Amino acid sequence: MKLVVRRHALRLRQPLQSSYGAVAERELLVVSLTDEDGVTGYGEAAPLEPYDGVSIARVEAALERYRPVVEGAAGMNGAEIVDACRRVDDLPEAFAAIDLALWDRTGRRMGRSVASLVTDTPADRVPVNATLSALDRTGAAEQAARAVELGFDCLKVKVGVGDDAGRVAAVRAAAGPHAELRVDANGAWSVEQAVRSIEALSPAGLELVEEPVHGLTAVREVRERVAVRVAIDETAAEHGALTAGVADAVCLKISRCGGISGLLAAAALVRASGAEVYVASTLDGPLGVAAGVHAAAALASRGPLPACGLATLGMFDGLIDPLAPVEGKIALPDGPGLGVEPL
């Protein structure tokens, strides 16, 4: 197979502020794999260094190390190719792109969607949350009202970034009593800060608080001391986190899990522990978000999912969103493979 890697940058309409800083631009690596029959599949590597500590250059170097494996992969199936890449350089953010391209290539060859390759009964739509990026009360309230008008049932607010209580209260007032409201601290707090902050925010009616602190021990302590449901995101990368039972829900991401295959395996472990699972984007490009939608649609065939954090492509400037949500849900692409074309 022929492997091609190229960079592509997307700029956000307005920076997204979180506790680890503001993101104004996303640099992605688009990967293509073309087999001897001329069928090409596309994948995407989307590291976000402030979030996962992995630079785009590090992923580029890993993909270059994979080249001899991929180009000498005659007779190997997709799982064997990904495992061989992992042995060369165990970097999930890199071999995720190979995994996506292999799934996409297979779907394109067979004329079937990736989700239908995973399960016979994928969901046709995936519920998603709206991410509110405004840092002031008025702006957050306006975004919340607009999201509800568009049919979103779940809204997400970044916290740990200043005036949390004011913005969350403004969002609740604008969204009304029936919308689910989740907050994401990205590990901004200590245990004591988390407990105080969650208690202060909980009168707004929270569906869950995501990653209030970093670390399994700290998450367990916070969960034992608050009445609000707790989810982990960054902490899910820790060894043993998926089966630790420290949280009510686990946020899984294509890049961190090493692709669709890894995410599905991780979801099985989480569900076996008794926790819920939902899928989110790390401001991925269209291929990464499509992969998340296919994975979520497959998971939904085995049990209901909370709203997933996949409605993020509309945050980019100048990008026509091929996966635009309608009434708070993203339709499963009906084209073969991932169902979207590369940038």
Image (cartoon, rainbow, N blue to C red):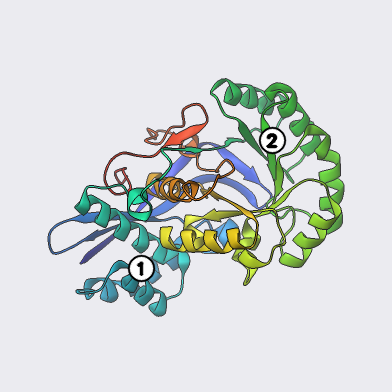
Give left or right: position of 187 versus 238.
Answer: right
Q: Residue at x 69, y 26 (%)?
A: 178
Secondary structure under badge 2? strand
Q: Is residue 55 visible?
A: no
Say few, some or many: other residues with alpha carbon within 10 Å of mark 1 (under 14 / 14 to 19 / 20 or more): many
Give the CA separation, mark 2 to mark 1: 39 Å
Name the quadrant of the C terminus.
top left
Say few, some or many: other residues with alpha carbon within 10 Å of mark 2 (under 14 / 14 to 19 / 20 or more): many
Give the amino acid at mark 1.
Leu
Give the percent coordinates (x, y) of residue 81.
Answer: 31, 72
Q: Nearer the viewer, residue 301 or 342?
A: 301
Q: Nearer the viewer, residue 10 or 311?
A: 311
Give the amino acid at mark 2.
Leu
Reply above or below: 143 against 336.
above
Discs 2/1, front: 2
Secondary structure under badge 1? helix
Reply above or below: 271 against 309.
below
Q: Residue at x 31, y 43 (%)?
A: 339
Name the quadrant of the N terminus.
bottom left
Give the percent coordinates (x, y) of residue 261.
Answer: 42, 62
Determine which residue is flagged by label 1.
63
Give the percent coordinates (x, y) of residue 63.
Answer: 36, 68
Q: Residue at x 32, y 53 (%)?
A: 117
Determine which residue is flagged by label 2.
181
Give the percent coordinates (x, y) of residue 98.
Answer: 34, 63
Reply above or below: 196 against 89.
above
